[in-house]
Amino acid sequence: MPGDAVVVRGTNDKPAASTALARYFEDHEGLGGRLFIGYPIIGALDGKYAVDAVYISPTKGVVLFDLVDGNNIAGFEDRQDEAANKLQSRLIGHRELTHRRRLIVPLNTITFAPALGDRAIPEDDEYPVANANTLSDSLAEIEWPDGNEEKFKRTLSAIQSISTIRRARNARKVARETSRGARLQRLEESIATLDNLQSKAVIETVEGVQRIRGLAGSGKTIVLALKAAYLHAQHPDWRIAVTFNTRSLKDQLKRYINNFTIDQAGEEPNWNNLRVINAWGAPGGANRDGIYHEFCVANSVKYQDFGTAKFRYGQRDAFRGACATALDEAVSPKHVYDAILVDEAQDFPPEFLRLCYSMLDDTKRLVYAYDELQNLSGTGLPSAADIFGRDDAGSPIVSFHESSQDIGARRDIILDTCYRNSRPVLVTAHALGFGVYRTPPEGRSSGLVQMFDQPDLWTDIGYRVAGGDLSPGHDVSLARTGHTSPPFLENHSTLDDLVEFKTFADAEEQTAWVAEAIRKNLEEDELRHDDIVVINPDPFTTRRNLGPIRKALLSKGVTSHIAGVDTVADVFFDTEKDSVTFTGIYRAKGNEAGMVYVVNAHESYSAATSLARVRNRLFTAITRSKAWVRVLGYGPEMERLIAEYEAVKAANFELRFNYPTDRERALLEVVHRDMTADQVQAVRKQRQSLSNLIADLEAGVVMPDDLDEELLDRLRDILNKDNG
Amino acid sequence: MASSAGPHAKIVEEINDITIFLVEVGLANDQNFAFWSDGPNSTKTVNFANMPPFAPMLKARPYSEMYFEQRESRAYNVRMLDGALIQMVYEFRHDNLERYRLAFLPAPDLQSFQNDPDVYNEDILFADVMDPRVVTVPLRFDFDARDGVSENLVHPKSHLTLGQYKSCRIAATAPLTPFLFAEFVLRSFYNTALEVVSRDLPAGSLRMEKCITAEEEGLVHIGVPYSSPRREMVRQARTSKASRRR
């Protein structure tokens, strides 16, 4: 007995009929199958062709809808012919859908005109026309006697296939079937096709703001890029901007968009209307433009470059200050774009998202994608109410509650399947990122460094509750599922090969080991230079630490380079030359490699402040790995880090912890919050003076009576409030 | 073999020592090793890549175009963390230095990095070096001892060109060794208040002979440490005196 039809609502130019059609399928239970609105787009010799809507089911095959807003259906026969011909030519290219030169799935057509009166519907068996009242009858006429679940799946897959997008770079030369190179090759081929859920997220379009959340490696960037390409294909005259934080994403984004558009629509995108641009931008030509700069120009407010902004607002708040000031100064912001898509939103200040919001026309098509844990500076993204503010009545201007209008399209999309990291790698990264198995410091009961505000987020990102209770104050045990962490990602190697933690006597020993390991990867394991990445998590020590390793490699005849900031060509991997990539944490973001070496993982293990930031970096570094990761360091702190990993292993790669209560979580945020250098100084001074006072009191040098009673009362109040 | 002990081999070694140093201290993002090869007319050329070593730089096109072309084709010994390209090419004939080109080609446009806050987060070393007030200037030390090329005052044998100005040829006392060039570049453009990177550069002992004319010396010129037969004698005398005293 089939379930309800799944509706995937994209965008087309017949909104009324689309909504009516979506509503019909939502209201009629048990139809099964899937309805796509505004998809697919078919590239043909005479230009691209967009299907209004298509319904696929195991019992009916393919039903193409020609949608009509209003009641003029003239030309419907030709339109139905065209739709069927175009889709036919697209599907016939898929061998698994043909048998002896014919499609195994029937193509039917219906013109759906909900505004048409019953009496105006023509009698036509060959070219059916229906309104909402008669649609059931028209659909009932369509049958697929030979249909079954298997054929349905094949058809569905063919229609929504976006498989060329992630084609790997040049194939590797592999001689041995079991070498790392061979295993990596097979892995990449398996990942190449986007799955159903990802393509759904690409097509789903809403009026208003849409949020895409997902864990690392879930394909947020791809989904965002393809979404932009899809919108552009459907609305070629819209002005669309795609922006990002990490420079290396620019190249990736353009590539995905280009591939998708050519694959689906048979033509190149119009880069004048679909723009992949930086967030900040600078004067001096289209190449350097950015959203903030465009805002300033459009609204005639003063543009500030980073140097100026840094001077005025401080380094950390430079962009925030610049955006906030620009927003204040712009009296009534001009509408510059029809849609803006923002990747890595967690790395931008909320003011930037507000700025983007203000640059949109009234539909406010803003799509932003983010990952909570990958904020490298340690602060999370505030709620939508905090980002976009509230109206006079106090309601949030932007909210993600599903409205009745949103059939088949989500405002809040969560991608829960990780396609990059295997289960052991991902769970290790989460365990370290949150400090799940960190030994609690003195006086505390939990070693946690940070925790999601909403416990549900854990299941949203693909964990299931393996034991206990996922709620504050309770013990819980979380594990990945076979669906959200596909086994094929980990089956190619043993557990101990997938993840290896190692400690050394000192930096020199670490250097020697890494250099030799890389040499072996290249000379014996059949890996390519661009399959390897060496990451130093702490930006302050990156160049100093990586230099000696690069030197050691040079003496083994292995070339390497540092992916630095000095780049106009935002290229991370040197695909022209055989060179291993070395990088700091910021440039590593958004990139991935089969073999990842995380060096000096022990640094800042015992940081007194901003521990969340340190852990986030570890998380980001580890999750760069498509296959194997080596986490290295030296000293006693490395041993403690390794102990955390051993605990993850002992827990069979489950996260077991006591979920902090609201109070406890607030404390976590306070304790591990991000502080400026000045604040760090201030805290340090006060700690010292408090320590001195206590020492004096204990030694009797100062007596409690010597202290002002009022001051003591205030102190008691503060201390009691925290512990209450 | 006698030729492998010649000055060209020492120059190769000095350049590569410098290259490795820059990699080790994290100033270099990318590098090519130097090597020497036999050229026409009994020359030996020290170069960094298999490409024409003395390609004309004075074609009339914008600096940025030339810079990016060299960068794309990886025509450098070292690409520094701020994008500057360091090029060192030496040509010897019969063990005498015939000509060279030493170039420091900074990235033409630094503003695109500066508006990226992550620059400062990520490349702390880099951020110190970058200063929004700075205007980068490409500079070139050229040497040419071939007949008919140099001309007193107009075209000194060893000279410095600033900003790619065609007629800018500031006379230099003597040819520069790789060490002297690298030390000059590091000290002038990469030392910061906190890090005196030039100090640890492996010292080269090579010095070249003075080639400036008296008239050139009478005008503003660049002073370069040089070796002379008399200096050599004095130096040797001092060392042997010292060893006798022990």
Image (spheres, coloured by chain):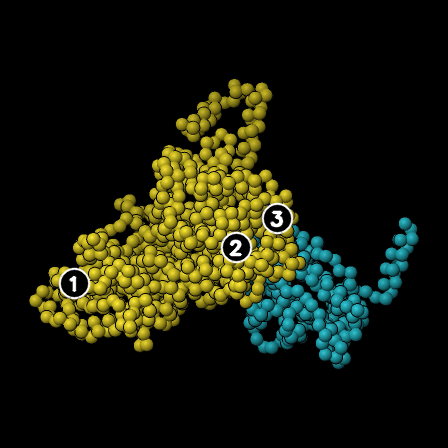
Indicate the chain coloured cyan by its letter: B
> Which shade of the palette goes to chain A?
yellow
Structural distance between the alpha carbons of marks 3 and 1: 68 Å
Q: Are marks 3 and 2 on the same chain?
A: yes
How far across and how far down the image is residue A164, in percent? 39, 65
In the rendered structure, which amino acid carries the disc numbered 3? Gln
How far across and how far down the image is residue A509, in percent? 64, 48
- Mark 1: secondary structure: helix
**Left or right placement of residue B131 versus residue A368 in this view:** right
Q: Are marks 3 and 2 in contact (CB under 8 Å)?
A: no
Q: Are there few (<14), some (14-19), or many (20+) residues within 10 Å of tag 1?
A: some
Structural distance between the alpha carbons of marks 2 and 1: 53 Å
Quarter assignment of residue A96: bottom left
How far across and how far down the image is residue A83, in percent? 24, 71
Q: Which residue is mark 2?
A: A595
Q: Which residue is mark 1?
A: A139
Say which label, 2 or 1, has the lower sequence index: 1
In the rendered structure, which amino acid carries the disc numbered 2? Met
Q: Are marks 3 and 1 in contact (CB under 8 Å)?
A: no
Q: Are there few (<14), some (14-19), or many (20+) residues within 10 Å of tag 2?
A: many
Label 2 resides on the chain identified as A
- Mark 3: secondary structure: helix
Structural distance between the alpha carbons of marks 3 and 2: 17 Å
> What residue do we see at 33% from left, 56% from top?
A197
> What residue do we see at 65% from left, 48% from top?
A508
Quarter assignment of residue A553: bottom right
How far across and how far down the image is residue A180, in percent? 52, 57
Label 1 resides on the chain identified as A
> What residue do we see at 21% from left, 58% from top?
A22
A507 up-or-down from B220: above or below: above
Label 3 resides on the chain identified as A
Q: Residue furthest bottom?
A: B148
